[in-house]
Amino acid sequence: DLITERGGNLLIEFIASPMYENWLKKNVPSKSLIYVTPYIKRDAVDRIFQHYPKFCEIKLLIRGNNEEFTYNHSSDIEALYYFHHAHTFDDNNLRRLQNLHMKAYLVDGSKLLVTSGNFTANGMFLGRNRGNAEGGIATDEVEVIQSFLEYFLQLCQQSQPLSEFLDSLQIPYQTYFEVTK
């Protein structure tokens, strides 16, 4: 289930489903958390953040295309409302990049997981027998983390903050549910 190689201070691990049990739960942030994931669901947000400190700085980059919140239900607008109304959350820390496909999680700037798992119950909590069969590589290698952060900052420069796109999502989301009732 878990393969570990150690060379000096370098730790590289293969992490199998479920991502939350096998990595995120063991790497609870004390100061910061970066999530890069196309899809986000409220059930995953609730389950993860019940264990994380309220004062932790959270940065979240999602894909956030309108159809993902309406027609194919791969993301929940309720998850965005959670961040929008969180007392310690800055709207600029939730951003949208419409061609995002990468999934990565960085804890306290020192532990990185690059995975196939989205920020959803299927991607984070369920094992390969009930949810998606996910896998990823975790590392604490400083150069890899620095490269990831540089790329993350480039993506953020190309993205929109929550305050610029939440309103544009609400209209098609409401219209979709009015039509499908």
Image (cartoon, rainbow, N blue to C red):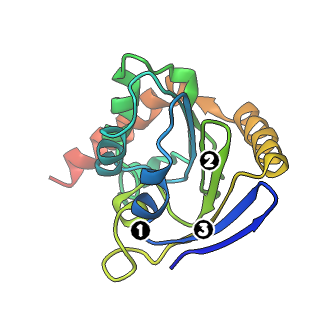
Above or below residue 154? Residue 180 is below
Residue under the point 77% across and 52% down: 141
Lower sequence index among marks 3 and 2 = 2
Above or below residue 149? Residue 39 is below
Q: Residues within 10 Å of mark 1 (few under 14, many from 20)?
A: many
The percent coordinates of residue 102 (x first, y second) are 65, 57
Lower sequence index among marks 1 and 3 = 1
Mark number for residue 74?
A: none
Residue under the point 46% across and 78% down: 133
Query: What is the residue that sits farthest to the front in this orientation?
Result: 8
Query: What is the residue that sits farthest to the bottom in this orientation?
Result: 129
Residue under the point 57% across and 22% down: 92
* 3 vs 2, front mark: 3
Element at label 1: loop
Q: Is residue 66 left or right of residue 4?
A: left
Mark number for residue 98?
A: 2
Element at label 3: strand
Element at label 2: loop
Query: What is the residue that sits farthest to the left in this orientation?
Result: 181
The percent coordinates of residue 138 (x first, y second) are 64, 60
Q: Is residue 52 left or right of residue 101?
A: left
Which kind of residue does numbered mark 3 sit on? Gly
Mark number for residue 18?
A: 1
In 3D space, how far apart are the residues under numbered discs 2 and 1 (Cα atoms)?
Answer: 26 Å
Above or below residue 107? Residue 166 is above
In 3D space, how far apart are the residues under numbered discs 3 and 2 (Cα atoms)?
Answer: 23 Å
**What is the quadrant of residue 59 in the picture?**
top right
Which kind of residue does numbered mark 1 sit on? Pro
Residue behind mark 3: 136
Residue under the point 59% across and 63% down: 115
**What is the quadrant of residue 7 in the picture?**
bottom right
36 and 144: which one is in front? Answer: 144
